[in-house]
Amino acid sequence: MQQIGAANLKKLFERRPDLRPAEEAVADFTSALIALFRRGGTLFVAGNGGSAADSEHICGELLKGFRSCRPLSEETKERFAAAGGEEGIRIAGRLQCGLRAVSLLSHPALLSAFANDVDPALCFSQQLFALARKGDLFLGISTGGGAVNIRNALITAKAVGAESWLLTGGRHGVCERFADRVIAVPESETYLIQEGHIAIYHAVCLAVEEALFC
């Protein structure tokens, strides 16, 4: 396990020893996210059902402070003051530093239009094709590992040069064949897989925040 964020990840596996089979992948994913955000890249996340909610949850933890308030730098505050005077200073005093994270569930007009007009299984792929750039990262979440739209999105991510990761369970579905790396919770029941996912991404978000803001 790498030093950056190691304490938070260590606590995860102390609390959840059942997740230890995923320990190396989780540590590598944490390092990949830290490197991604340091170079100004964007994380894209998608899933279905409960995993769709997890996609939103992950991005929510990254776009604002999680445990840290992430105050703006003095240089940034000065830019706000120059842009808006006292009002700019007030705004800068309330904002928090965020990381570039996009949930592909957050565009309902596009999702419904593309699903109706073209192909519902390619809604995530269309967004990745339009938005992702070489060096970005896509995290697909599929508890069973067989979601067709996640499989398509993993393929699309690879085609545009984005790193692709799959967060899944122990069923070893077809999506694993198309991801660069896989984080697999060793469970077969959907709700147990989802419980493992929440524990993992909370620890990862804490470790990323610690590395970049603390």
Image: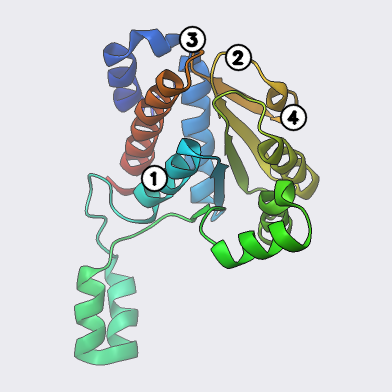
| Residue count near mark 4 (Cα–Cα under 10 Å), binned few <14, some 14–19, many ≥20 | many
According to the picture, the residue beneath numbered tag 2 turns out to be: 171
Please indicate whether residue 97 sits to the left or right of residue 28 in the image: left
In the rendered image, residue 177, in percent from the top left (x then y), is placed at 75, 23
Q: Secondary structure at mark 1?
A: helix
According to the picture, the residue beneath numbered tag 1 turns out to be: 57
Image quadrant assignment for residue 75: bottom left
According to the picture, the residue beneath numbered tag 3 turns out to be: 21
In the rendered structure, which amino acid carries the disc numbered 4?
Phe
**Residue 40 visible within the image:** yes
Closer to the N terminus: mark 3 or mark 1? 3
| Residue count near mark 3 (Cα–Cα under 10 Å), binned few <14, some 14–19, many ≥20 | some
According to the picture, the residue beneath numbered tag 4 turns out to be: 178
- Look at the picture and state if 90 lies above or below 22: below
In the rendered structure, which amino acid carries the disc numbered 3?
Pro
Q: Nearer the viewer, mark 2 or mark 3?
A: 2
